[in-house]
Structure formats: C-alpha cells, structure tokens
Amino acid sequence: MDSSMHPYRSVLYIPGSKERALDKARSLPTDAIIFDLEDAVAPDAKAEARHLLVAALRQGGYGKRSKIVRINALTTEWGLEDARALRDAGADAILLPKVNTSSDIDNLSDVIGSDLPIWTMMETPVSVFNAREIASHAQVAGLVAGTNDLTKDLGCRARADRLPLMMALQMIVMAARAARIVAVDGVYNRFRDGDGLKAECEQGRDLGFDGKTLIHPAQVEIANTAFAPTNSEIELAARQIAAYEESRASGQGIAVVDGQIVENLHVVAAQRIQAKAQAIAEMAAE
C-alpha cells in the first residue's frame, strides 16, 4: 500500500461500546477511524461492544474515512471472537495489539483470512526490534506507534521532546517506509493542550509519520493541518516538476529552482506532495 493513495493525517480512536460516538464519527473530518474494542472498553462490556460495532459497520455511513478495528489481543478471552465477528463486518483493516513477531500476524490471518489488511500496534520493545519483520509481512498495511505502552515498558520519563522514544519512533517509520506501508504516530494524552499537540504533530511529521492517532475529536483539525502539505510546499512542488521537465526536454539532467538543484529524487518527492494534496482534496469534497 502506498500511503499517498489515502491520507492518514488524523486517525481517531472511537470506543466500540458507545453508540453515540459511533454515530458522531460519521460526520467528523477525520481521515481514519480506529474503532476500539480493546483499551476503551471495560471487560464486562466487550461482548456487547462487539455486537454494537458490527451493526454500526454494516449500517455504514462513514464515507471515505478508513475504518480500522482494534480487536483485543488473541491471547485474551475476547480476541478470537472479535476477529471472527469483524472479518466480514465491512472494516477496511483489523488493528492487532500486542504484536511482537510476524507469527502473531499469522495467527490473526488464520482467523480472518488473507484478504483483509492487518495493522499492528508497535507498543513493546520486542515489536520495535522486530519492526522490519513485522512491516514486511504480506498482509500488514500499517504500523501504529503505541507510545504510552512503550513509555511504560521502557521505564522512561514522558518528556515533551520525546527524546527517550526517538529510537523507537524512527525504527517504526523506517520499517514502514522500507515496506511502503502507512506509519501513524502515537497519541497525545493532554487533549485540551492544543499547542502541545501541534508541536508533537509537527515533530511526528518531521520524522516521517503519515499522521497521528487521536483520542478526542477536538484534536482532529490540528492533526489535519500539521500533516498536510502547506500551500508553499505544493507551489514549490509544482515549480520543481515543471522546471525539471523543461530541463529534461532540453537535454539536461538537472534543473535549478530558487537557487537549489532539482534532480529526479526531488521530483519524486514533489510528486508525492501533489498526490497527498490531491487525496486530501478528495476527502474534503465528500
């Protein structure tokens, strides 16, 4: 999957147990939804949430938003039933938590079949060390950084600059890029802190993530803006492509734009920016 085919700037967690939230999600300007049956649902509500979510997905109405379902780990008493119930419910992907190796993905594939894409939570030190193996699995289409669990397992401090997590974040992005799949950054817990969220979104964008997982609808607009190409980036991309094409037509291999050399690799990056801007415009036109 090429991440430019669909934007994943904002990936909003929605509790699978709350009917009102499931309905409201149909009108939110988020690029993707993670319908959560794991952390957001109490143990005694998981079976009911599963049935409620299946009904909501079959009812539809979520438009172009990517519909991803986070089931419970297969090692729990709910995981297998989640997988069986959701495999034909109309989800675009299943998000598997507590993934450590590609064999965990094989176990899920045995239940849901090989056609439904799988996303994986990268939330343990083992999963980070195995990121390349996990990302290269034929059925895996996205990696989601589980920064809260990583912070807990590492025993590190939660810093605004996320320095203790930097190695893990970069390994997740590199594994996703090597496999040409989606990489989504972890959540920002202080959902009323817009400035802090903006800063962390910009950091994630600079690292190469496609977008950010969110825990509240109020965070969507900030993430959408941070992970979208700016007007100046789009304008520069168009000028770079035009200048390079003109240079090639005259028999030259490079061009110069704003005093900087433009080679084929710059054109590829510019085309990626244009494709992402187009995909965002198509989402907005829904």
Image (cartoon, grey):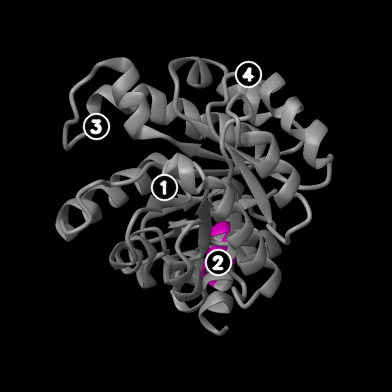
Q: Amino acid type of disc 4?
A: Thr
Q: Amino acid type of disc 1?
A: Ala
- Name the element at disc 2: helix
Residue on which disc 2 sits: 274
Q: Nearer the viewer, residue 137 or 228?
A: 137
Residue on which disc 3 sits: 162
Q: Nearer the viewer, residue 250 or 149?
A: 149
Of circles 3 and 1, the one toward us is 1
Whether residue 254 is visible here, answered yes or no, is no
Marks 1/4: CA distance?
24 Å
Residue 244 lies left or right of residue 113; in this view the side is left
231 part of magenta stretch: no
Q: Position of residue 254 (x, y in %)?
A: 57, 51
Local crowd at mark 4 within 10 Å, few (<14), some, or many (≥20)?
A: some
Q: Position of residue 14 (x, y in %)?
A: 45, 58
- For residue 222, above or below residue 199: below
Q: Residue 206: which disc? A: none
Residue 185 lies left or right of residue 203; in this view the side is right
Q: Residue at x 48, y 50 (%)?
A: 210
Marks 3/1: CA distance?
24 Å
- For residue 176, above or below residue 242: above
Q: Position of residue 104 (x, y in %)?
A: 67, 23
Of circles 1 and 4, the one toward us is 1
What are the residue bounds of the magenta stretch? 271-277
Q: Residue at x 75, y 37 (%)?
A: 139
- Name the element at disc 4: loop
Q: Earlier in the sequence, mark 1 or mark 2?
A: 1
Residue on which disc 4 sits: 101
Q: Position of residue 57 (x, y in %)?
A: 65, 66
Residue on which disc 1 sits: 40
Q: Amino acid type of disc 2?
A: Gln
- For residue 138, above or below residue 67: above
